[in-house]
Amino acid sequence: MTRLLRPFGRAVTYTRWLHLLVAIVWPSMWLFVEEAWWIWVAAAAALAPAGLVPAMRTVEGLQARLLLIGHRPDSGSADIVVAPSASWSDRGRLVVWLEARLLVGCTTSIVTAQLLFATVDLLSAPFGRDFGDGGLFLRGHPWWHLLLVPLTLVALAVTVVASGHLITALALRLLGPSPAERLAALEARTEQLLERTRIARELHDSIGHALTVAVVQAGAARAAGDPAFTDRALDAIEETGRAALEDLERVLGILRESERPVSSRPTLTDADRLLESARASGAKVDAEMSGPLDTVPGPVSREGYRILQESLTNVLRHAGSVPARVRIAVTGGTLTLEIRNPLTADIPGPGRGSGLRGIRERAALLGGHARTGPDDGDWQVHVELPLS
């Protein structure tokens, strides 16, 4: 019983009924001037060109969201589009919606009015009152007519609830996103997921690099027992930590502001910072750069920077203070990154480690390829990225 009465405790039940009555206000005003059946035909004909106006979908969508859906978080208001019509398919569905709203609104108003008149007649008949022929055309004064009042009230309640559910279902169908809009929304969602994955990689690379440098520097300073070396190690830890905090603040800013430009992300032109950080950690880094790095496209340069960062982090983490050779070359339409260091006992197996996996994923997303593993007595990371 409670479940049956629940709809009548929700405001949206009555706003849906109001939404249907609003649809017939202007034809009803016309009826006050001249009462004729052709007015409804003329009203239906006038709605067809109105539905072809792109802005009409915005008006109808806003009304439907406000009166049919309500403000509940799980109400599905996002399934009703408020953008102007973008195609003839959208306009056609809007015309059908306007005609359906007029038809359902007209039917609901007539049935509601007749049930109200019938209820009044049933209540007044036993007392000998006659309110005209707007209801059930009752005659006489039988008291048993009062027993029929609950039936008309139930019919009225069912009409209000059922018509509200019907018009809401039609709105979701006819005012909902078109296949093209659904595809665009899916693509936008995919882009968001890819962006989250990219941000997770950046945090892994940046924070992982800073922590690795800090651990290596702290260990080296403790083993050296040299105050001067300890001071240099602390300076390197401070500088690397500050750079990691800047990266963290930038990534959090991107999360807070979805429209924030990506131009502030580090690129290969900032590679010297990575090389100096690795050298300050004790690694002997020999770098060779050739070609115009400043002409490398932004996405390629940014991903190349992260690949270099992760590769140097792996050198420090797994090999320690060993000689490393870095080669960055821009030749033709390809960016080549190669990082080599002597093999040590702590060698990740093929495909192991989130760092190596992240390097391969970054290269694949840009249409390039990465090769990692032992090569001629060294551990090698060789990446080739197309510039186009």
Image (tube, rainbow, N blue to C red):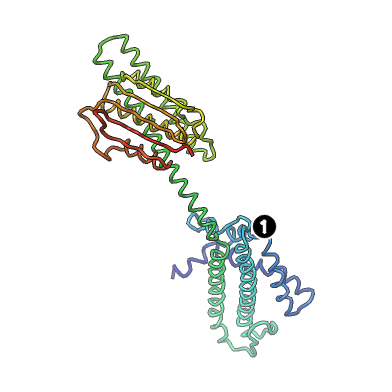
Q: What residue is shown at x 33% (from left), y 16% (from top)?
A: 233
Q: Residue furthest bottom?
A: 140
Q: What residue is shown at x 56% (from left), y 83% (from top)?
A: 146
Relative to 271, is 261 above or below?
A: below
Q: What residue is shown at x 64% (from left), y 67% (from top)?
A: 95
Q: Quadrant of the N terminus?
A: bottom left
Q: Which residue is mark 1?
A: 55
Quadrant in the rendering for residue 17: bottom right
The reply, left or right, for residue 179 in relation to residue 205 is right
Give amino acid for label 1.
Answer: Ala
Q: Depth check: give the residue in front, 368 or 114.
A: 368
Label 1 residue SS: helix
Relative to 98, is 310 above or below?
A: above
Q: Residue furthest front?
A: 332
Residue 157 spot, x, y in % from top left: 54, 73
Q: Residues within 10 Å of mark 1 (few under 14, many from 20)?
A: some
Q: Residue furthest left?
A: 345
Residue 142 spot, x, y in % from top left: 59, 89
Q: What residue is shown at x 64% (from left), y 90% (from top)?
A: 140
Quadrant in the rendering for residue 20: bottom right
The reply, left or right, for residue 228 in relation to residue 3 is left
Residue 212 spot, x, y in % from top left: 32, 26
Relative to 16, is 303 above or below?
A: above
Residue 189 spot, x, y in % from top left: 47, 50
Looking at the rendered structure, the number of numbered marks drawn on it comes to 1
Quadrant in the rendering for residue 137: bottom right
